[in-house]
Amino acid sequence: MSFETTGTIASFGGKLLKLKHKSESTNTDMELNMFLPPQALKSGAKVPVLFYLSGLTCTGNNCSEKGFFQHGAAKHGIAIVYPDTSPRGLQIEGEDEAYDFGSGAGFYVDATKDPWSKGYKMYSYITKELPEALFSSFKELDSSKVSITGHSMGGHGALTLFLKNPGMYKSVSAFAPIANPINCPWGQKAFKGYFGEDQQQKWKEHDASELVKQWKGPLEVLIDVGTGDNFYKQGQLLPENFVKAAKEAGNDKGIQLRMQPDYDHSYYFMATFADDHVEWAAKHLNAYGSVSFKHKPLHTPLPRFAPWFGSTPIYLFFCSITSDVHLIA
């Protein structure tokens, strides 16, 4: 399988590649982003890989543009793969009608119920087809050092893919994961649609709070959830159920559930703790190839407008695309 590079963007000393390829798992063209850190640009270099799985409605663009994972990844010499969240354009009736099912909501499972089984096979795509294609096409990626993380639906994906495939990933972490989907509205809707209401055992096979009960050996997981997250308050995430299930199975000692005061479900939350999750992966990947960056100073100082606003200096930033003016105190 070959990738088409549709764009290359400089980021933190490395390169963010915008990629496209034909997928047998989804029967569609799939797009993704991949960040290659500066260490990977050296001849003969091999770098570890962190897969980041996005949440509902997202594509590979969201986190690569707003999550600030590249900062820590460049420091530690880690490539980051940002896949899409579902097939696109299968022309299935109802595919684009809801934000939490169908397009943008593949839930990282292989659908068994028609018509979704036609191409909604994101589990196979993420665990087999995509990594095999990437490691074959990009020799700078180290296939023996792979970790996984994700947000919301992607946090569910990260946890379940890690637990269902012992040894495939060196570490796992999650931001505000849907940690017990069989007991929340999002998960119940998705599993009913992709598997069928009568396939309760299949549901459990893709629920982190069920899978952790069968885990053998030590388990280390980092989970961050904001106390101001409305989806947490509505019972969509249920991270405590995951910790409780792990504790009952004697697997909770290495689980860190960090409840972050006031943070919500957005990329403001994720960007705040992105470095922590990259650091978590780096520790397990033995990836500490640090690199420093030298930023050129501004040739002309930013204008100060303190007389307008009392004693507090105000800087004006003009967006090059729109006419918006952003005030930074």
Image (cartoon, grey):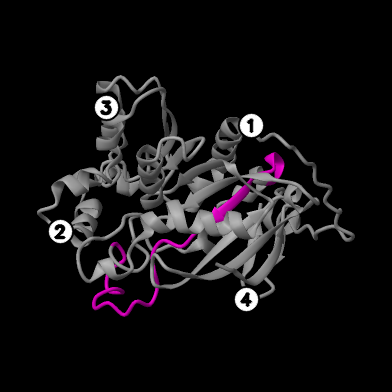
Q: Label 2 crowding class (10 Å Cα cut-off): few <14, some 14-19, many 20+? A: some
Magenta stretch encompasses residue 172: no
Q: Label 4 crowding class (10 Å Cα cut-off): few <14, some 14-19, many 20+? A: few
Mark-to-mark CA distance, 3 and 2: 27 Å
Q: x, y percentage for residue 187? A: 24, 52
The amino acid at mark 1 is: Asn
Q: Is residue 147 toward the left or the right of residue 87 in the image?
A: right
Mark before the other along the chain sequence, 4 or 2: 2
**Front label number (4 vs 3):** 3
- Residue 286 numbered mark, or none: 1
Q: Residue at x 42, y 59 (%)?
A: 125
Q: Residue at x 68, y 55 (%)?
A: 309
Q: Which residues are magenta?
A: 74-100
Q: Which residue position is annotated with label 2? A: 196
Image quadrant where one finds the N terminus: bottom right
- Residue 45 numbered mark, or none: none
Mark-to-mark CA distance, 4 and 3: 49 Å
The answer to whether marks 4 and 3 mark residues whose Cβ atoms lie closer than 8 Å is: no
Q: Which residue position is annotated with label 3? A: 244
Mark before the other along the chain sequence, 3 or 2: 2
Q: Label 1 crowding class (10 Å Cα cut-off): few <14, some 14-19, many 20+? A: few
The amino acid at mark 4 is: Thr
Q: Quadrant of residue 93?
A: bottom left
The amino acid at mark 3 is: Lys
Give whichever of 66, 183 is nearer the camera. Answer: 183
Mark-to-mark CA distance, 1 and 2: 42 Å
Q: Main secondary structure of the magenta part?
A: loop
